[in-house]
Image (cartoon, rainbow, N blue to C red):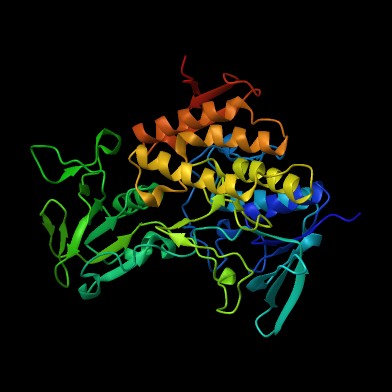
Amino acid sequence: MMGPRVAVIGGGAAGLCAARNLLAGGARAVVFEQAADVGGTWDIENPDSSMYYSLRTNLPAPVMQFPDFQFESTYSFPTHAEVCDYLRKYAARFDLRAHLRLSSRVTRARYAAAKCKWTVEFTRGSNAGHQSEEFDAVVVCNGHFAHPKGLTSVVGLSGFAGLVMHSHDYRTPGQLDSVRRVVILGAGNSGIDISLELAQKYPAAEFILSHRSYQAPQESATAGIGGQYEGISNLLQRHAISHVSGPAAVVFEDGTAAENVDAILLCTGYEYRFPFLTRAEDDMETPEVRLQDNVVQDLYMHVFHVDNPSLCFVGLPSKVAPFPQFHFQTQWITAVLCGTRTLPNSAEMKAWCLRDREERKARGEPARYGHVLGDLQWEYNRRLCDAAGAPHDVPVRKSMYVDCGRARREDAIGYRRRQYLQLGPGESQWRVLLDGVDITPP
């Protein structure tokens, strides 16, 4: 008996991992990738890429790598090009290219209950007409770094006369070489990285990092970022932006203001979007994909649609080690679609969704954090493995992840000088070197 035919939408890390596990489990996977090659956001030539040329990972390679494919890298924190190369080697290692449909953009996926089939419509190449094929299931792996968030959230931004850019479109410091004062909104990984790059490249200009978590010291409303940024006198912190008050003025939430601002750089994250899953008015059979507060609703453990589990999602959780989690998610998806494992009934899956929301609310998390895992990722990964009947992750990954996070918070400039060495699978089977000196915590 042939395994299920599965459409995988997206040929980045998640899509390749889905194909690898589906094929290994006996499914017939077809990967639709709209770009000319695989790599997703890690391919800087991909029009949807969010990479900038100086980008290096913020996790060491032994933490990032798939559990079944080692990441060979000169440095512990690889460049975006090295990650893209790693993904293409992964595709070659597991013979995935024969299952790829490159330059193929999925325009619609619709479900027919009578046949228990999905019809996936797509175009191939710039001048090709629409084609369609039938599948037993759809696995959505289209990433979440292609659609910038926050472009309309800043009050008064339309009246600003200077440059407005989202980090998605940032590639090199030269894009801002003529500015003298820049406000950067958002202090996530990209906001910090880009702020540091710009401030060090243009010491005569002033850069203001504006974010929600800033707490001004009593003696000054504008102070250089803490000890880890000492020496960067032209990189200041302020509270989050309240509004733009004119063609060159920004007001912050504490009432202070910055005048003569030349540019506003939005490092405000991204939105989930699934345009190919938009239901036509007369379509009552395709499961509805609802987004609320940038959280995909009605997904059991962030993966299976509770109304139709033949629609699955990979890679929605954030603040995680992503590639290993893709592996655990797609092992579970494979086990369910190929019939070796079963899911709870719809009522039980919906109860999990409600319980997850209530637990997050009780912890004081805003609704928009619905896919944020952070420290919860390790228990989540364990549950994925149990659900799939697969081995648990190696404990050493968590140990290195935690140490790297601490180092990044303490020294955002220098933490990438560290070299992480995995010696085995155990919790303490690793070392970290700084400039050749062993600094592994006791």
In this orientation, does residue 18 appear? Answer: yes
Q: Position of residue 210 (x, y in %)?
A: 24, 52
Residue beneath the point at 66% across and 66% down: 33
Quarter of the N terminus within the rendering: bottom right
From what the image shows, is residue 144 above or below residue 400?
below
In the image, farthest residue toward the front: 347
Residue beneath the point at 78% across and 68% down: 115
Residue beneath the point at 47% across and 46% down: 354
In the image, farthest residue toward the top: 442
Q: Position of residue 204 (x, y in %)?
A: 22, 55
The quadrant in which residue 312 appears is: bottom right
Q: Position of residue 403 (x, y in %)?
A: 46, 28
137 with respect to 377 (left or right)? right
In the image, farthest residue toward the left: 219
Residue beneath the point at 40% across and 35% down: 408
From what the image shows, is residue 104 above or below residue 330?
below
The quadrant in which residue 10 appears is: bottom right
Observer-nearest of 181 and 189: 189
222 with respect to 324 (left or right)? left
From what the image shows, is residue 87 above or below residue 154?
above
